[in-house]
């Protein structure tokens, strides 16, 4: 198998385990052990780890190994604020640019995140919730915004999922009501209401962080 294919396999496997909380923040990884487990040499594993480190999922510690990084509450909220700012901007320019949203795609994402709640599959719920927002933001075809969005999706899903695992006493799945309300407003052509909902989402999320003692 070509080295690039091995790197891709190692990268995808490790990232999936990190995002799913199978490798929790604070876990020390060994290149040798990972190479043995994945049945490949250390080189593709090391390259995959370098890629993950550039994305902020892990950090290399001299003479100790590789540490799975925690996504802090501040980092999570900064990324979420950026996403919501892009969402609000998209809704701001929607009318003046005569942008038509893919309502079928939005409805599909919304239905899937609602189904994920019924199955208590929080990670899938988060991923589809992010895809809902991405479907709106992508409508203005701003590649820089989309690249930023892509860099946030997995980290936000990971941070939210680990918070979900650590706070079973808090009611979760709040994005279902938010995205449902945004979808209904857009269906009615009420862009102002959709913007109002998006603007209020960050304030609500931040207050929940305070309630959970994460600030």
Image: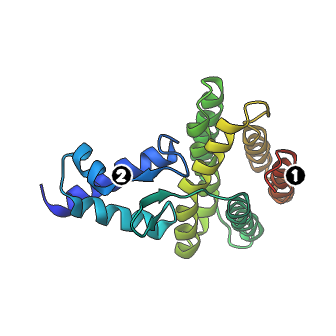
**In the image as oriented, which residue stretches furthest toward the bottom?**
144
Quick one: SS at disc 2?
A: helix
Q: Please give the name of the residue rendered at 78% of the width and 52% of the height, measured from the top-left corner.
A: 214
Q: Which residue is mark 1?
A: 207
- Is residue 94 shown left or right of residue 204? left
Q: Is residue 188 left or right of residue 151?
A: right
Residue 199's x, y, as percent?
83, 60
Q: In this rendering, does residue 90 appear at all?
A: yes
Q: For numbered disc 1, what is the local secondary structure?
A: helix
Residue at numbered disc 2: 12
Closest to the observer: 131 or 94? 131
Q: Taking 114 as reference, is 9 above or below it?
A: below
Snapshot quadrant of residue 129: top right
Q: Quadrant of the C terminus?
A: bottom right
Q: Is residue 104 visible?
A: no
The residue depicted at 73 percent of the width and 63 percent of the height is 74
Q: Position of residue 138 (x, y in %)?
A: 57, 63
């Amino acid at each position: 198998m070509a080295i690039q294919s091995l790197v891709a396999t190692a990268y995808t496997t490790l990232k999936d385990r990190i995002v799913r909380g199978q490798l929790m923040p604070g876990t020390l990884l060994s290149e040798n052990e990972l190479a043995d487990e994945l049945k490949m040499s250390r080189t593709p594993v090391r390259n995959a780890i370098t890629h993950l480190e550039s994305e902020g999922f892990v950090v290399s510690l001299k003479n100790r190994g590789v540490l799975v990084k925690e996504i802090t509450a501040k980092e999570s909220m900064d990324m979420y604020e950026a996403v919501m700012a892009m969402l609000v901007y998209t809704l701001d320019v929607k009318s003046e640019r005569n942008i038509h949203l893919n309502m079928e795609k939005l409805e599909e994402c919304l239905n899937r995140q609602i189904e994920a709640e019924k199955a208590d599959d929080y990670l899938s719920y988060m991923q589809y919730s992010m895809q809902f927002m991405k479907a709106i933001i992508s409508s203005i075809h701003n590649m820089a915004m989309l690249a930023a969005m892509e860099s946030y999706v997995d980290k936000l899903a990971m941070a939210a999922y680990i918070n979900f695992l650590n706070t079973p006493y808090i009611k979760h799945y709040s994005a279902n009501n938010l995205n449902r309300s945004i979808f209904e407003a857009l269906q009615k052509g009420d862009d102002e209401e959709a913007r109002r909902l998006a603007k209020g989402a960050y304030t609500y999320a931040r207050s929940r962080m305070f309630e959970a003692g994460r600030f």
